[in-house]
Amino acid sequence: MKSVWIVDDDQSIRWVLEKALGRAGISYRSFDHANDVINALNAGDPAPQALISDIRMPGPSGLDLLARIKSLLPELPVIIMTAYSDLESAVAAFQGGAFEYLAKPFDVDQAIALIQRAMAQSAKPAQATAEESGVPEIQGHAPAMQEVFRAIGRLSNSNATVLITGESGSGKELVARALHRHSPRAKRPFIAINTAAIPRDLLESELFGHERGAFTGAATQRRGRFEEADGGTLFLDEIGDMPAELQTRLLRVLSDGHYYRVGGQQSIKSNVRVIAATHQNLEDRVQQGLFREDLFHRLNVIRLRLPPLKERREDIPELAEHFLVKSARDLGVETKQLTPAAMAHLSTLSFPGNVRQLENLCHWLTVMAPGQVVDLEDLPPELRQESAQMAPAVNMAVPHTALVGVMPKDRAGDAFGWVDQLGNVVDRMLASASKEKDARIFEALSQDFERTLIARALRYTGGRRIEAAQLLGIGRNTITRKIQELSIDEDATSKANPAANTSP
């Protein structure tokens, strides 16, 4: 029977825990120094099922011990206890991978219950793996998702190039992995690379590798992602952002199946299935001269469109339950449940971040919701305020969209009465947020104000940033930074306003 190890230089704490564990029928072993724990593990002693350690001790601290334990036994649950209940200690403990943080003085029964939870978590891995194997790779019963599943099934015996389109956060990489797992290449590598996340100067070497001495800093030969994926699948995410010169090299690989490392003289044969993905409209980028038409046709052999979450709202309850279970398992805590009212409200939300946003929300609820049952008031304030009902000229409930359509089009000031309308918005938001400790109304409306100004200016100038910045009276760097910070969709705003924009 595995035991629980207690680590504390305070003999009285060790004694209390020993007696409580003994009454609970749990085997234990005590240490007064962190080094003794490491020595015991290095000597080959059977590892415990859970470990509870003080944070401040002579010699290595509990956080030092936590780091060593995680390097030796990553799955071992470690509970950190301390009489110094400060924010820094709690954050450091959780960042280090602690199972839980226990403040002294503690209730003995609660401490034992926590230890038992940790022991149960330690015993889960084999069972969890078996359970996970029965979980669908991609979940969804909506008709749009069933079409995706059918397409994956039809492609199961194919090596055809696939282009996956869909909004950010909709699960394009999950589809790519499913295509790989159900293909003849399933036993070979699946290599994913986000072409938008790698500086253009490094992307060529990242994809194709380089020879020693090919450029400054190339001290050794390096294999690229094409070589790493040999015999398997290479997933090129955000392909629409690939630089033009690399588009040419990629086209050659897809055309004749050969490529060269950077600085190399020997042709390398490629045996890779390429799956590409983008949230952008590649046809538009071809028309704008930003994407090669011949490469587009090479990639666009089979196209799969992944629907945004707003087109598959019937899947939200199932996805939410799945992500709550997953978050609880990852954190080693009990799974939280959504009330019917909270679930119904989630099913009405727009979720612009799609499935990724829903997953992040479920993780937030697992960490932050005070009880095991999550009701409407436990949701983040910005989601509680979101509503499908629109008041005349302005959405009175939703942060981040509250000011769209309210600003005057020609000059600042209150010539159009927008300040009064803003006042009404603020009054309603204050009333709905009166019970909240952190409603963040100022931040939400400030972001809406800036987003509306910049989006309308870009629309007015047909997407020309410099001209829009000049009209608004801000700098070029400022508008570029704000576009990124506020997640402004330039594709949606770049269509010029024919009634206003007369610039060439």
Image: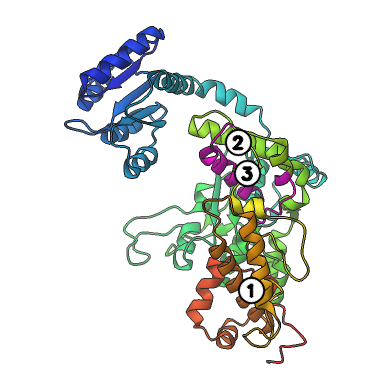
Quadrant of the rendered image containing residue 215: bottom left
What residue appears at the point 78 percent right and 43 percent down from the top-left corner? Answer: 314
How far is the residue under mark 1 from the one under mark 3? 29 Å
Q: CA distance from mark 3 to mark 2?
A: 17 Å
Q: Residues within 10 Å of mark 1 (few under 14, many from 20)?
A: many
Q: Quadrant of residue 186?
A: top right
Q: Is residue 6 left or right of residue 497?
A: left
Quickly name the residue at label 2.
324
Residue located at (44% from left, 63% from top): 202
Q: Residues within 10 Å of mark 2 (few under 14, many from 20)?
A: many
Q: Which residue is mark 1?
A: 452
Residue sitting nearer the eye, 100 or 307: 100
The one nearer the camera, 268 or 340, is 340
Q: Residue at x 56, y 33 (%)?
A: 371
Query: What amino acid does circle 3 point to?
Result: Glu
Drawn side of residue 118 relative to residue 126, left or right: left
Q: Earlier in the sequence, mark 1 or mark 2?
A: 2
Residue 225, visible in the rendered structure: yes
**Which residue is the site of mark 3?**
377
Q: Out of 449 and 461, give the one closest to the viewer.
A: 449
Query: Does 81 sit above or below residue 317?
Result: above
Q: Quadrant of the C terminus?
A: bottom right
Q: Residues within 10 Å of mark 3 (few under 14, many from 20)?
A: some
Magenta stretch: give its range: 345-372
Q: Inspect the image, locate mark 2, and give the three-letter code of the amino acid beneath it.
A: Leu
Q: Could you say where residue 25 lies in the image, as x and y percent from the top left? A: 40, 7
Q: Is residue 406 left or right of residue 437?
A: right
Report if residue 366 lies within the magenta region: yes
Q: Nearer the viewer, mark 1 or mark 2?
A: 1
